[in-house]
Amino acid sequence: MALSDTLAPRRAALDATHDPALRSWVPGADAHADFPIQNLPFGTFTPAGEEAARGGVAIGDSILDLAAARRAGLFSGAAERAAEAASGGNLNPFLALGAAPRRALRARLSEILAAGSADRHKAEPCLHPAADCSLHLPARIGDYTDFYVGIHHATHVGRVFRPDNPLLPNYKYVPIGYHGRASSVRVSGTDLRRPWGQLKAAGADAPRFAPCERLDYELELGIWIGPGNALGEPVPVAEAAEHVAGYCLLNDWSARDIQAWEYQPLGPFLAKNFGSTVSAWVVTPEALAPFRIPQPARPEGDPAPLPYLLDAADQREGAFDLQLEALILTPAMRQQGLAPHRLALSSTRHMYWTVAQMVAHHTSNGCDLNPGDLLGSGTLSAPEAGGFGSLLETTRGGQDPVALPSGETRRFLEDGDEVILRARATRPGAAPIGFGECRARILPAA
Amino acid sequence: MALSDTLAPRRAALDATHDPALRSWVPGADAHADFPIQNLPFGTFTPAGEEAARGGVAIGDSILDLAAARRAGLFSGAAERAAEAASGGNLNPFLALGAAPRRALRARLSEILAAGSADRHKAEPCLHPAADCSLHLPARIGDYTDFYVGIHHATHVGRVFRPDNPLLPNYKYVPIGYHGRASSVRVSGTDLRRPWGQLKAAGADAPRFAPCERLDYELELGIWIGPGNALGEPVPVAEAAEHVAGYCLLNDWSARDIQAWEYQPLGPFLAKNFGSTVSAWVVTPEALAPFRIPQPARPEGDPAPLPYLLDAADQREGAFDLQLEALILTPAMRQQGLAPHRLALSSTRHMYWTVAQMVAHHTSNGCDLNPGDLLGSGTLSAPEAGGFGSLLETTRGGQDPVALPSGETRRFLEDGDEVILRARATRPGAAPIGFGECRARILPAA
């Protein structure tokens, strides 16, 4: 394949499943869709009228039921073993398998779903219209870690406190991260209750306990961990990519007023753990292979990463070119029939550290990662206005309200507002893919 | 019972199981033991020569196998249902049950194990010598949250940075906490590998990646969560005690050099997540009922807790009087046949917030807690020397080495050192109980 020859990546090998000319017989699997045949993301779902959650693959406007496809005899060998692991109520056993079985299943799914496939008659009864299915969190999340690798976000936030020196001295040495709350991660489509918390006004003597008044979103890339490592056995950066099973969108909802008062000295806690939202589909490293790019060059004067974070292949192809978008839909906009309004257009190019560096750093002290663990990139803001991944940045902490097409303005999120995150990977010579939406609506405080 | 009449607590009701005159027929269940018949803590274990983990109850020098006791027909009704939930490979189903079934099982176990019990012949074959069993983590931990409620520890640490104003302004309003790493919590007896990490010397231009040179322990109370709450539905402080299933000892190992460099702005991460150690036995709220005390009075001038953290019953009996001890045993001490040397003697009296306040605060924004979640109190130091729950405090950051009976000194922990935490509850008129040990030895960096 010409594309493969051009990129010649080491890990992110391109094969017949990436052929941009490939088409599927499934309706809706078009070139402009999130789920053409070149994507084939995994998730869990329940068809309308049924009860049991099961594993599936998104294709066009449909979901292929993997358990049904197995019963139809569509798989054998490594693909069958991977399909078995991916067909239950959560994908943890599948994530644990690692790359080779995942690739085998992808290759076979691509054959089955390709236009002209001899298996169409067997596969067609295994499809469900996606619109009629409920989607679930794809995995049981053991631990959730949120990083802070969006350097422009870190700079924008730091500027509020230290205008002349926004980034702390450790930022360019340490892939900064902290532990988030795994239990409150929910799948796209789940409403989010506005939290109560301790709020302390700038001039007030004491805090009061009240509903959050500065509710914000954060536009992040989510990373699903694959095989993982035993406690005490770090993952070298050169092997780190093997432990990533896939990607999603992540909205790290943030209560800015709670955060400002509580976060010293141990970091964010109740300002973040009332809920996080992820998109439902696990987009595989294989699907993203055509969109790999070299790690963007560090600005002149930045230190080189310490050796434990440095790998030539990771430098060459460890980053992504993935467009990220955040949109808002207010109740008034809904009433007026308006489309969601774009708050930000950003990119995974703005990650100062690669995912492999995040994994290597996380395990460098021996900390274990396990199948189904979730990592967040941290907010990925572009350097310029129009690309800020949070309202904190967009409205400069509420000072400059955003104007919406409904005639409204927003400093922070209001009840009934819906935030929608989207992702799109495009590249000349590759079939574009998307992630599906990550959306949730704000319910009033209890 | 006289004791019950004296204390008249609301939740912490005393009954026949607390009678200090009660004795067991099981050897080693003496008044000076950790596990007399008044304790009856739950855990999971595997007997020598067997493979399957199962639930048990510590009594004297033995462990009662709950599954075997069920097969022997020792339980019925609510006690049987609780025993069933507690007899598997982890206690999560049992923790989820809440107080009433737990109390029923405790009452029945007390009957079975009491001297003169007619059930002795049935129960005796269900006992295993504890010394021949391996103990496991009692529950699958969903999320682990570490608090910072030891006010003397917070003051000692804060004094390093702000000599005149050691406590931050939020400390007396907010039960400060942060999310820890659940996956790396291990049961007592599991060795701990010294972590590598980024260390930056005070005068150095850049950090280097090397084994931790300032490895420390932290003496904490651990709290096992029971039923828990649904996302978006806070637990009121008056109901919070119902969601606590038990207690343990917790050593929150800390790499002080990694921590100093990494922790801004998002809090501790790799400095803590390489391992935490808990004692194996879940000591129930019922066992601790005789040791309840009023929440210690706040110093003159401290603000009252906000209303969502204030409950009269919790103020009256929400604290504990539990003696906590940290000891060290070095390889040289072991060679010389010396006993472990006490580093600190402290108490749960030094908690500025009660466990109920921690639970109410944690869920006040809607965050969900789930059965088997673990909370840590944060380091519980006494105000005076001899009672500091970390070497950071005891040696003033390594400035004043501790002298050991072997002739050695310690600024921080060295390879081969073993840290042992113990707890003991005593009170006039009550049978004293202990927690069993929380111990682990430091392995050299990999």
Image (cartoon, coloured by chain):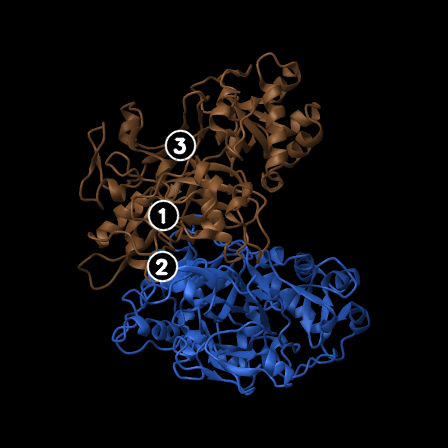
Chain colours: A brown, B blue
Q: Nearer the viewer, mark 2 or mark 1?
A: 2
Name the kind of residue labelled 2 in the image: Ala
The quadrant in which the C terminus of chain B is found is: bottom right
Name the kind of residue labelled 1 in the image: Ala
Give above or below for B301 relative to A412.
below
Q: Is residue A148 visible?
A: yes
**Count of numbered circles in the view:** 3
Q: Which of disc 1 and disc 3 is earlier in sequence?
A: 3
Relative to B376, B440 lies left or right:
right
How many C-alpha atoms fall within 10 Å of the one at disc 3: few (<14), some, or many (≥20)?
Answer: some
Q: CA distance from mark 2 to mark 1?
A: 49 Å
Q: CA distance from mark 3 to mark 1?
A: 40 Å
Q: Nearer the viewer, mark 3 or mark 1?
A: 3
Relative to A112, B397 lies left or right:
left
Give above or below for A239 relative to B437.
above
Give percent across and percent down for residue A348: 38, 36
Chain to which the residue tagged by mark 2 belongs: B
Give above or below for A37 relative to B47.
above
The quadrant in which the N terminus of chain B is found is: bottom right
What label sits on residue B206 in the rendered view? 2
- The answer to whether tags 3 and 1 share a subunit is yes
Give percent across and percent down for residue A57: 56, 28
What label sits on residue A446 in the rendered view? 1
Chain to which the residue tagged by mark 1 belongs: A
Secondary structure, mark 1, is loop
Q: State the residue position of label 3.
A: A321
